[in-house]
Image (tube, grey):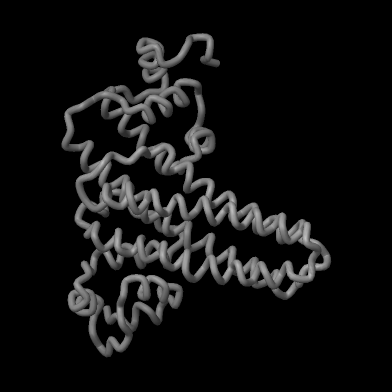
Amino acid sequence: MKMAELLERDSSLLGVFARMGLNFGYGDATVEEVCTSAGIDAGTFLIICKVYADDSYRPAPEEFEDADNGVIVTYLSRSHDYYINVALKDLAADIGRMMFPCGEAHQKVIWKFFTDFKEELLKHFEYEEKNVFPYVNGPGEKVPIGSYEEDHSGTEETLEDLKNLVMTHLPASADQQEAFKVLSGITSLQSDIRKHILLEETALEGRTNKESATLDDDTLSPREKEILVCVAKGMLNKEIADANSISIHTVITHRKNITRKTGIKTVAGLTVYALLNNLIDINSIE
């Protein structure tokens, strides 16, 4: 496929092209040719493009076994730069214009909410840069998955709260035209960050799965024990995901690892295992 044809099919990939550092003026060059000249693995590039172009697509962790982790990490890091230096600045400017006609009290409330969200997001980005990216890209400290996924969940929830505040609780004195821009900006940022999270988590899971396949250690991790307890209590995957602020896909991955390590496939069998290993009390089982 020609590179120009790929972009013509979906203009939403413009952001991907920019963060990949690809220059325009492809002519009749193919995706493979353009990526090779830019020093980018074409297969990895296409995975990223598909994540952003197809809302129904969720790459399996196995797809990342042959991917170039360096390309993924570079892309994710440049996404952070975009969020900080473009998206959040534009959103802040729109919020400022939206709230300008309002009273000081209303302005302070919205600004505090947005500022707190921005500070938490920056802390999470810093954590990813120092801990997650090195782990995805090569040897490094093992990532504490639980808190990492909880931060991701918090980011999405805070953006949703901000959107709901504007849609349903905005003071009548606020600039309504600017409110449309704010909502558009939030929706766009939500979508982009959701894709960012999907790409990041799947790449991390792919690396985790690859490592676990080469290890003989059958000891359940603390997180796996937490999931096992939930399973033993009769909770469904969605309930487990909601209770632990992780994705259903991550729950399924943990359950596969639990089955692989214990050799037990049924819920009843896992419940007995949990009881025998003092992970739950018999009175906690419904």
Which quarter of the figure has residue 106? bottom right
- Quadrant showing the N terminus: bottom left
79, 257: nearer the viewer? 79
177 vs 230, left or right, is: right
* Marker count (numbered): 0
242 vs 49, left or right, is: right
Question: Percent position (x, y) of residue 163?
Answer: 65, 58
Which quarter of the figure has residue 19? bottom left
Residue drawn at 50 percent across, 32 percent down: 236
112, 33: nearer the viewer? 112
Do we see residue 60 in this rendering? Answer: no
Q: Is residue 129 above or below residue 9?
A: above
Question: Percent position (x, y) of residue 230?
Answer: 47, 26
Do we see residue 99 in this rendering? Answer: yes
Which quarter of the figure has residue 78? bottom left
Question: Percent position (x, y) of residue 9?
Answer: 40, 78
Residue drawn at 66 percent across, 67 percent down: 95
- Quadrant showing the C terminus: top right
Q: Is residue 181 above or below residue 281?
A: below
Question: Percent position (x, y) of residue 24?
Answer: 32, 85
Determine the residue located farthest toward the right in the rendered image: 172
Residue drawn at 65 percent across, 72 percent down: 181
Q: Is residue 211 above or below residue 270?
A: below
Residue drawn at 38 percent across, 39 percent down: 145
139 vs 275, left or right, is: left
